[in-house]
Image (spheres, coloured by chain):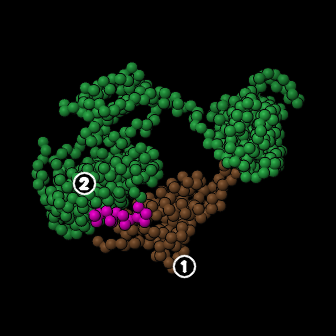
Amino acid sequence: MKENQNPMGNVYVSHRAIATIAYQSAIESYGVVGLAAKNFAEGIAQVIVRDPTLGVEVGFDGQKIEIDLYIIVEYGTRIKMVAESVSSNVQYRVEKTIGIPVDKVNVHIRALRISDTD
Amino acid sequence: MINTEYKDTLAINGQTFKAMIAAALTWLKTNQQIVNALNVFPVPDGDTGTNMVLTMQAAYNEIQNLEENNIGKIAHAIAQGALMGARGNSGVILSQIWRGFARGLDSLEEMDASILTRALVEAKITAYKGVVRPVEGTILTVIKDIATTSEEIKDQDHILEILEILVQAADKSVIHTPELLPILKQAGVVDSGGKGLFFIFEGFLKFLRGESLDTSSAIIVKPLELMEGNELEDIEPGQDFEVIVDFRPSKSFNLDVFYADLEKMGTSIQVGEGDGIYRMHIHVPTENRYMPIDYAMTCGTITKVYVENLLDQMENKGKESDQPLSLTEVEPGQIAVVAISPGKGLSKIFASLGAAAVVEGGQTMNPSTEEILHAFEDLPTDKIIILPNNKNIILAATSAKKASVKQVEVLASNTVPQGLAAMLRLDPYSELDEVYEEMQAALSEVDTGEITVATRSVTINEVDVKEGQAIALLNSQLVCASETIEGACLSLLEKVDLSERERFTFFYGANISNEEVNHVIDHVREKFPNIEVELHQGGQPHYQFIISIE
């Protein structure tokens, strides 16, 4: 739970809410074709998940948020650029909507999707 | 001299396409800064123009030394180069566009009109495949519109004519982007990536037409980007009035001469063109305010004139915003709270907490009974609670209660923090007497600190005060005097029993500078590390600070 001070009370934002924001901005980032389950043990890294908490991990140390994203990238894009862009998109959107600084966005590329062969 | 070499071209080969890519790159470079200037996102895509240029450069490097005549092979090399050199978000999308384009060409020797259409459609499809949820109003929309237009003009077979239509479609699509993406509209710009793609296609066209590529259209800004009121930049001397004139130029109109003449009149000159209409924008000193209009009369037919006094605009901007308060609307049967507030900032806070009416007034400007009565008389409910928020106003509030036929309770809030604490207990759907008791109980849960400057020398409560000293009142009792505001704040807070207190909320007044406020707050935070310190604009007169201690 994150806390935000406002003049007359506290605002609590759940991990899940933050994960949802991160998820939404991740899938709007170019090159990202889905999020993957973060848990490898489940053996379903290839399965594109729709539940935001499955592909996003949110950590909070009392001051700053750290986010881990597990993404699937379109094959044939420059992965480094896609990762940078999703990272900055997510950071920007979470900071803007919640107002708590995001320290890090770690991007884990779990898989590539090959939609066409050249 | 317009080159007519490609006037009747029906198909493009690899080497011609290489030259077209070179031209597109040059044209994009020429206009790079225009594209960069369109960026509205502070983070996601730093410099779209630069990123697109670098991506195109990487694509071109890949084909620069290829003597290949097969356009399919050239296109695949371009796609490869763009992929490896993709920079930024827009670069990645651009590389996908080239990838699809190359796929559409396959390994064909030449590209005719139908192949071009197929390649553009494939480019669009590939670009859209790269994202789960495409955002419209971006470069994606522009490639889509280009591809769609290309499909619509199947009967055309001259490449040059097709490109003319496609460039127009791209332009139209770019201009339309703010309608699809609200953030662009707010910023008053068009999409930067889309604009970059437009320049690439315009570069193709310019090459086929044999037009020059090194003269930037930098000074030509489309009217859309120039809409009045977008920019409230700092006003320099001699920029007193903003004049915008739309006119249809006469035949003898010469843009260079026009610029040169305008420069004699003022600064911030921009000229936009669209649909045969020119729009000029200039900042001029007061005495020249009609000159650009008179001058434009000589250049063609004026269709529209806007004149705005920038000095006035800036003055208004600096003033405290006089936006109406967003007061809570009450329905019949609900409880409405009328708060007396000593400053604009505090009025906003009361409004945000659910006050149905706010009457401004305080220490030396007590509102009259009539003013208070007037504030709630017309409210559509007959259950009223008045928060005087000042000892001296309780009497007037009580008179208002007597004068009204409504059910009115006056909560004896002596200070603003008490009033705010009471507001938090407001439940407009409950019974009036219950809510009143709840709010009453809240009054004792907060201590109030007030910092002001002594207007005369006096000794009260064994505190010696000299005129001009900063004094501190705790719950309306004088507790200390100090040479500085900061000193008064700190010694006031030391006198509070902090065992059950966890938060100081400072409301700063109209008579203290931001610098001083920050200075004081820094010291308070340093001295009371376990207390949360908040700061809000109160806007009250006389009191440098009103402090809520809870």
Looking at the picture, which amino acid does disc 2 mark?
Answer: Leu
| Residue shown at 15% from the left, 56% from the top | B158
Seen in the image, is B148 located left or right of residue B1? right
Check residue B537 for magenta coloring.
no
Note whether B149 is above or below B272 in the view shown.
Answer: below
Measured as percent of width and height from the top left, residue B381 is found at: 71, 45
Measured as percent of width and height from the top left, residue B304 is found at: 33, 32
Q: Name the residue beneath numbered marker 2.
A: B166
Give the letter of the chain under mark 1: A
To which quarter of the image does residue A97 belong? bottom right
Q: Chain B is drawn in which colour?
A: green
Note whether B121 is above or below B245 in the view shown.
Answer: below
| Residue shown at 19% from the left, 58% from the top | B17
Q: Quadrant location of the N terminus of chain B?
A: top left
The residue lying furthest to the top in this view is B287
Asked whether the beta carbons under mark 1 and mark 2 sit within 8 Å of each other, the answer is no
Q: Colour of chain A?
A: brown
Q: In this view of the protein, can residue B404 be seen by the observer?
A: yes
To which quarter of the image does residue B535 belong? top right
> Disc number at residue A41?
1
| Residue shown at 61% from the left, 42% from the top | B326
Span shown in magenta? B121-134
Measured as percent of width and height from the top left, residue B523 is found at: 70, 39
